[in-house]
Image (cartoon, rainbow, N blue to C red):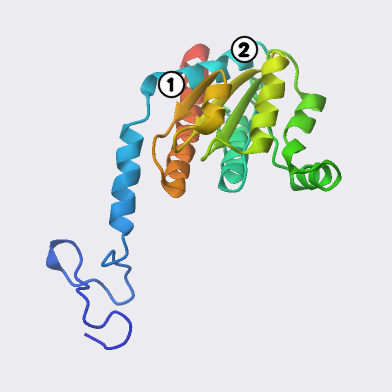
Amino acid sequence: MRGGVGAGKDLRGPGGAEAPDGAATTTGTGALRQLEQTQAMLGRVDPAALERLCAAVVRVHERRGTIFVCGNGGSATTASHFAQDLAKSTLLGPDDADRLRVVALTDVSVLTAWANDHGFDTVFEQPLRALARPGDLLVALSGSGNSANVLNAVRWANASGIETFAVTGFDGGELRRLAADAVHVDVADMEIAENVHLAVAHVVVCATREWKRERRGG
């Protein structure tokens, strides 16, 4: 075994085979523990809540409404990812005319314009006021469930005839109580909560695509 970084550590792979030079190992890093915790939390997601989120997406699409998605930080990237997947990855081909109307409220120019002039707490509510209509859907992602800008957007949506669905972590915070419904990930670890949130988004996308395929008849 060569000296330097990793010297003295067990670098054997599965079955006792020596890991190739430069291969990543989980020795002492906690990576396996994080993977196991993520897997465990995926197994604890309420399937009924997940079905209700899928049903909300389909319901809004059937009435030709728009699905809005918002979140901060890591949840902002998940919101953007979820929105583009709903818009693109639910297509049954490039000529599919049955397209979902989806908007991620995470455009940096819009966010910074509202934040600069009127404060960060307004950055999701104000674009909603311009774009959303009764019968639309707002999916709000938040690990803590206590982000003021997300809560303000949900309050306005609730008062304006827009369906609201939260995707939360930790204890769900105020958002879990404020939204009309929620998929809750009951874990006090932001990274694991966000791992599961992205998986939830992908499940909804895949389920929506399968619903479209079944409706088309194959």
The image position of residue 143, as x and y in percent, is: 51, 40
The image position of residue 144, as x and y in percent, is: 52, 40
Does any portion of residue 67 appear in the rendered image? no
The image position of residue 192, as x and y in percent, is: 41, 46
| Up/down of 116 relative to 159, above or below | below
Residue behind mark 1: 49
The residue sitting at 29% across, 77% down in the picture is: 21
Q: Which of 149 and 48 is in front in this view?
A: 149
Q: Which of 149 and 67 is in front in this view?
A: 149
Sooner in the amino-acid sequence: mark 1 or mark 2 = 1
- Residue sticking out furthest to the bottom: 3
The amino acid type found where label 2 is placed reads: Glu
Disc 2 residue crowd, few under 14, some 14–19, many 20+, Cα 10 Å? few
Q: Is mark 2 on a helix, strand or loop?
A: helix
Residue behind mark 2: 62
Does any portion of residue 55 appear in the rendered image? yes
The residue sitting at 47% across, 15% down in the picture is: 214
